[in-house]
């Protein structure tokens, strides 16, 4: 996500949460690329502490819908936290991670995997049987 994308996506996420809390919040949702399929994670923090995080691993709907849905889910439906209150919204930081399609990595060992990963660019998805874990 570049700076210009963030200037559009972050207010959209915050507005989606505000609407669910019956708070007014205007935003611009007219950028054509918002209609393209995309996958994202929305992370909420307060004072540096996690307050909610929900996302989509594979693009299956327009990015606009994915951002809105994941923002509301992170705020209201993350099972680790109580739903966000209207009073908390102003002290809540919203972060969005845009995901590209997953690709398998050819690695020899943990050190090789770490050497191939780019900090703040690459995420990793671990799968074992029916278990799945994501690190962005």
Image (cartoon, grey):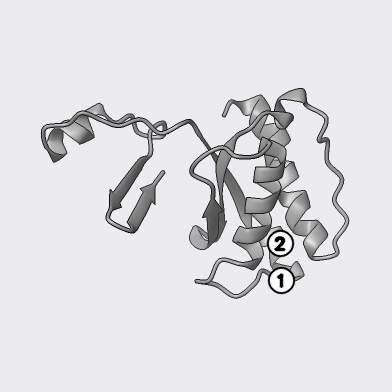
Side of 52 where 67 appears, left or right: right
Q: Position of residue 11 (x, y in %)?
A: 74, 43
Residue at the location (77% across, 24% down)? 32
**Callouts 1 and 2 close, C-beta under 8 Å:** yes
- Circle 1 packing at 10 Å, graded few (<14), some (14-19), many (20+), is few
Residue at the location (65% across, 44% down)? 66
Q: Which mark is residue 89?
A: 2
Q: Position of residue 16 (x, y in %)?
A: 76, 52
- Circle 2 packing at 10 Å, graded few (<14), some (14-19), many (20+), is some
Say what secondary structure mark 2 lies in. helix
Q: Kindly indicate the quadrant of the structure image that contains residue 9.
A: top right
Side of 62 where 52 appears, left or right: left
Nearer to us in this view, 57 or 111? 57
Indicate the quadrant containing the N terminus: top left, top right, bottom left or bottom right: top right
Q: Which mark is residue 74?
A: none
Indicate the quadrant containing the C terminus: top left, top right, bottom left or bottom right: top left
Q: Is residue 68 above or below residue 35?
A: below
Q: Kindly indicate the quadrant of the structure image that contains residue 52.
A: bottom right
Which residue is under mark 1? 85
Q: Position of residue 120 (x, y in %)?
A: 41, 34
Residue at the location (60% across, 34% down)? 38
């Amino acid at each position: 996500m570049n700076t210009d994308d963030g200037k559009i996506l972050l207010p959209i996420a915050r507005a989606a949460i505000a609407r669910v809390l019956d708070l007014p919040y205007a935003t611009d949702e007219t950028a054509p690329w918002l209609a393209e399929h995309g996958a994202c994670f929305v992370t909420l923090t307060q004072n540096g502490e996690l307050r909610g995080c929900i996302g989509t691993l594979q693009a299956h709907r327009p990015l606009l819908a994915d951002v809105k849905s994941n923002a509301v889910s992170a705020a209201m439906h993350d099972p680790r936290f109580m739903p966000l209150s209207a009073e908390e919204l102003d002290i809540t930081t919203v972060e969005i991670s845009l995901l590209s399609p997953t690709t398998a990595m050819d690695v020899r060992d943990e050190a090789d995997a770490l050497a191939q990963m780019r900090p703040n660019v690459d995420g990793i998805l671990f799968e074992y049987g029916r278990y799945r874990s994501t690190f962005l």
